[in-house]
Image (cartoon, grey):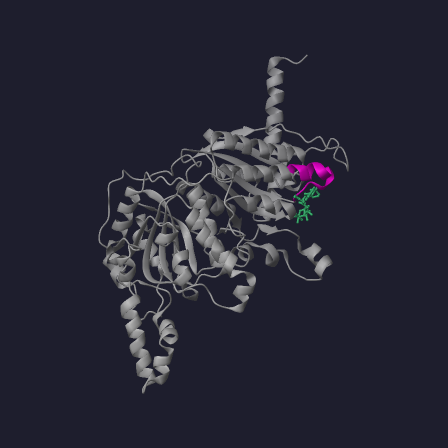
Amino acid sequence: MKTTREKIEAFRKKRMDLIEGSGEKGAKKQHEKGKLTARERVRLFCNPDTWQELNLFAEHRAINFGMQGKDIPADGVITGVTTVDNKLVYIVSQDFTAAGGSVGETHAAKVCAVMDMALKSGAPVLMFNDSGGARIQEGVDSLNGYGSIFYRNTLLSGVVPQIAIISGPCAGGAAYSPALMDFIIMVRGTGQLYITGPQVIKEVTGEDISAESLGGADVNASISGNIHFIASSDEEAALIARKLLSFLPSNNLEEAPRYGDGTLTWSEDNYLNTIIPDDPREAYNMLDVIHHIVDNNDFLEVKAHFSPNIIVGFARINGDTVGIVANAPSAKAGVLDIDASDKGAEFIRFCNVFNIPIVTLVDVPGFLPGIEQEHRGIIRHGAKMLFSYASTTSPKITVVLRKAYGGAYLAMCSKSVGADRVAAWPTAEIAVMGAAGAANIIFRDDIKNAQDPKAEKKAKIEEYENQFSNPYQAASRGLVDAVIEPKDTRRYITLALISLKNKRDIRPQKKHGLIPM
Ligand code: HXC
């Protein structure tokens, strides 16, 4: 019989073997591919003093296809909990060096167990994905495992933040767990995300494509819009995740962390008084406006590479987290198209479930006209913006900087779709459409029959501009609460946020609304 001492020694060895996993050989393979090991990823993300690992000793029980007795340390996934910047975070890190990080019954059960704990304790989940997908030898047990993860992704959705980091392959159904999470950070060069890989595509459609061109970080960020951030390394991905978490509450019943002591700080920002060009067709940099309004010029842009005509992201104003949604006149004149609507609506809904106030900065010429947009469904996509703003109950503050035309004016959080405060700069043009277009329609006959049609057109454009291309008609109807000088914008938003801190907005009971899909 073993002595207590021997039992402890044996335990130490067993534990060490599991922690070492595939050891130096496995680590070397990962490093050669430009990747960290699963454990290195956990370490760089979290504080080793507070790391508590769960289910280290879990083993698979598969027997088919050579699996009987096959050693897969920790069944290819490290799970546990830690505190990051004083916040509890549950972590999952797949170990590609152990059976390709493939997801079998036990691997999935470990992931599900931390998700269950995260739900019970109201803490975010962060998952490093680096896996060959469903463990082929385990057949339907593996599929069932994935299904159980998807089910929990959905249960956790809107309760605790979920962040996926794609640091290796993520193919097949495996792509759907990240897709069901709130944010995806992808490492350029090593992360791959697709439903069917190049080989299958070649067999089915005959198309030739490399894995990187099919589902690399750049493609997923700028073309498909599947991901939210690109990182250049695992280390940078962890930094982005930390930064993102710093803006977020741990769950939907908590408030976002507050920075600073609440002392009101603002100064007039005369630069903003000069930012709108005299020529209404001239662009300016909306990011510049955002940097001038938020604390410490610090803005975490989300989906920066996708549909740049709309900007979304997190910042703080007077220490409190806000979500910013803004049109970007420097990209497609800031028009709302299908992709911009999807991007905006997704972000607005995230802010709403976690009670984050939304600041909307408007300079929008309208929805993008065109056959392609109509046929692809701009109506149902654009409706997502209306639906998202109208169903949002967290505080909504809108500032109209320049153009706010037609349906797009409504879709950028007008008073009528539920803005709590609307301010407009003196340069605002809140109208059904731009003056030139409007004059061409309503004064068509006058212009046609005039002695000097060109001069008449100019006069009519001016007439329309004077009457409607300004903020005052909207202000006279109470659709704009205040016309403010641009330099006072930060002050206006800060006071509005304070006054809306305890906002209550009770809606009719229902299972859920039906957002156009
Ligand atoms: C079991 C797997 C595996 C898997 C990889 N491995 N994927 N084992 N099930 N799905 C094992 C390999 O056999 C190998 O084991 C080790 O992991 C490393 O794999 P390599 O192929 O040597 O690595 P690499 O060359 O880097 O290629 C990575 C890869 C490739 C591109 C991911 O492994 C691959 O194509 N794997 C299969 C991908 C796939 O078809 N998955 C199923 C998708 S279907 P040894 O012992 O040699 O080290 C799916 C359905 C889910 O996921 C549906 C949910 C709804």
Residue at far bottom of view: 451
The answer to whether residue 306 is seen in the rendering is no
Image quadrant of residue 261? top left
Q: Is residue 17 left or right of residue 221?
A: right
* Residue at 61% in and 48% down: 169
Residue 329 in the magenta stretch? The answer is no
Total marks shown come to 0
Ligand 1 quadrant assignment: top right
Image coordinates for residue 176, horizontal then vertical, percent: 60, 46
* Residue at 51% in and 49% down: 515
Residue at far right of view: 65
Residue 139 in the magenta stretch? The answer is yes
Q: Is residue 205 left or right of residue 473?
A: right
* Residue at 64% in and 39% down: 147
Image quadrant of residue 111? top right
Residue 476 higher or lower than 22, as above or below:
below
Image coordinates for residue 122, horizontal then vertical, percent: 47, 32
What range is drawn magenta here?
133-145
Image coordinates for residue 353, horizontal then vertical, percent: 44, 42
388 or 169: nearer the viewer: 388
Quadrant of the frame with the N terminus: top right
Residue 263 higher or lower than 187, as above or below:
above
Q: Is residue 158 left or right of residue 136?
A: left
Q: Main secondary structure of the magenta part?
A: helix
